[in-house]
Image (cartoon, rainbow, N blue to C red):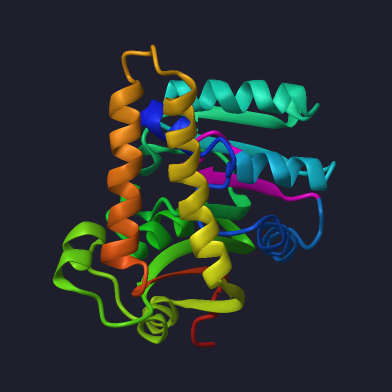
Amino acid sequence: MHRELISKIAHTGHPIKAPLDDDSVRRLLERGLPRGDERVLDLGCGSGEWLLRSLAARPRVRAEGVDISEEALEQARQAADDRGVGERLTLHRTGAADFASPHAFDLVLSVGATHAFGGLLPTLAAAREHLAPGGRVVIGEGFWDRTPSPQAVEMLGEYTDLATTVDRVVADGWTPVDGHVSTRRELDGYEWSCWGSLASWALDHPADPDSAHALATAAARRSEWLHTYRDSFGFVSLVLRRTPGPA
């Protein structure tokens, strides 16, 4: 069972691929789209849920998404057509780090996809290349809420604490104008939804040759979450603007 299919099934009940509930996503987009006629770019858009919600909430917004998965992009196209926003959405199948555009964007999104660039600051560097003057970035990144175990670091990576994460962003030339730290309810809800959806699919399709693998994967991921990183992992989403340089 390939990784894309696992992800698609796991996110059936939680199309935002980050620990954020609908109200948090709505608020972040409101802060990122203050005018309502912005041009939006999502670097690593997957099935395009952030873009779809932007387009649905703001009838004058135009959006572009970048991802390497044709299956995810096709899912985004179909969903855009179903929601009546397909004419305002353009999708590009390419690596997010390789994407080039002739125009700049008023909002650049990268929530839970910083791995595509090799980390938080490289993602912000990529966003900077696409950002129009006065534009905003909405970025989501993990952090260590408590001291992690060596196993958690090995599994999820070399995050820092929340204050250090924000300090690094500020030192890189950005000013946070809003943000959201995912609550315990959001963090737990995301994990329960993902691995519960995958397990439910396996139980509902016992004759499928991938059923046993899906069920085992759901059990393994649930165990990793509960035993390895639940008590230490956090997630922050920041709304950023460029900090002016010296006069």
Judge by depth and name the residue closer to the eye, 150 or 159.
150
Outermost residue, right direction? 59
Residue in view at x 63 percent, y 62 percent: 135
**Count of numbered badges drawn on the protein:** 0
Q: Position of residue 147 (x, y in %)?
A: 26, 82
Judge by depth and name the residue closer to the eye, 61 or 104.
61
Write down the quadrant of residue 62 in the picture.
Answer: top right
Q: Quadrant of the C terminus?
A: bottom right
| First to last magenta residue range | 37-48
User: Is residue 123 visible in this depiction of the protein?
Assistant: yes
Vertical arrangement, residue 143 with respect to residue 47, above or below: below
Q: Position of residue 95 (x, y in %)?
A: 36, 35
Q: Quadrant of the N terminus?
A: top left
Judge by depth and name the residue closer to the eye, 245 or 169.
169
Q: Position of residue 169 (x, y in %)?
A: 42, 76
Vertical arrangement, residue 104 with respect to residue 175, above or below: above
Q: Residue 38 in magenta? A: yes
Q: Residue 35 in magenta? A: no
Residue in view at x 78 percent, y 63 percent: 34
Q: Along the horizontal axis of the image, is 68 left or right of 135? A: left
Q: Along the horizontal axis of the image, is 160 left or right of 198? A: left
Write down the quadrant of residue 22 in the picture.
Answer: bottom right
